[in-house]
Image (cartoon, helix red, strand yellow):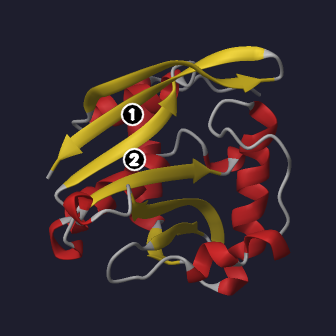
Amino acid sequence: MTVAMTSGDRRLQTAATAEAMKIRDAVEADLPAIVTIYNAAVATRIATAQLELVTVESRRNWLTEHSPDRHPFWVAEIDGKVAGWLTIKGFIARAAYDGMVELSVYVDDVFRRRGVARALLQEAIARAPALGIRAMVGLIFTHNEPSLRLFAQLGFTRWGFLPDVAILDGVHRDLAILGRHI
């Protein structure tokens, strides 16, 4: 039996998911799920410029590069499973850019359209002042329309555009820089 879901029903489902979601610091035990989610994004060529799949071993530094008090690495957990993750990293390592960060967010295919990315980004925005963040950017391929829409809905605006900066499987891709002051 197929059940049609109205947009109101989808909002209720998203609200219910958000209530059951736990956002926490990533730990080493999360790394296999984090890598699986990332590798799924690599394969789609929509959310990362990485062209080759990565391994858990090659990405162990992801967790050690981040510090919970300045540049956290969070996972969103639903029913004990890592549904998505978000990193906050320094933008450019120059003193004048202190307080400026780059956000990256990825969601497991199974948990898409359930508010995971939105919840992670909202958490980053809410906690930004306590983390010493004054501005955030997301570097998003222009063919990644869902991410562009989500960032715009959360108050990010276009701060820059880099035409034809990536080549993904022979296709030239543009990169949008979306930013938000805190």
**Which of disc 2 and disc 1 is earlier in sequence?**
2
Q: Is residue 55 left or right of residue 107?
A: right
| Residue at (79, 59) in percent of width and height | 36
The picture places residue 136, in percent across and down from the top left corner, at 28, 50
Mark 2 = which residue?
118
Kind of element beneath mark 2: helix
Q: Is residue 115 above or below residue 159?
A: below
Across and down, in percent, residue 95 comes to 24, 66
In-front residue for pair 2/32: 32
Residues marked 1 and 2 touching at CB (< 8 Å): yes
Q: What is the three-letter code of the residue carrying label 1?
A: Leu
Q: Is residue 99 visible?
A: yes
Describe the element under mark 1 as helix, strand or loop. Answer: helix
Q: Which residue appears at 49% of the width and 51% of the height?
A: 104
Q: Which mark is residue 67?
A: none
Give coordinates of residue 52: x percent, y percent.
85, 46
44 above or below 99? Answer: above
The answer to which of 82 and 49 lies nearer the viewer is 49
Q: CA distance from mark 1 to mark 2?
A: 7 Å
The N terminus sits in image quarter: top right
For residue 80, say whether it is visible. no
Amino acid tagged 2: Arg
- Mark 2 Cα within 10 Å, few/some/many (few <14, many 20+)? some
* Residue at image mark 1: 150
On the rendered structure, is 18 left or right of 70?
A: right
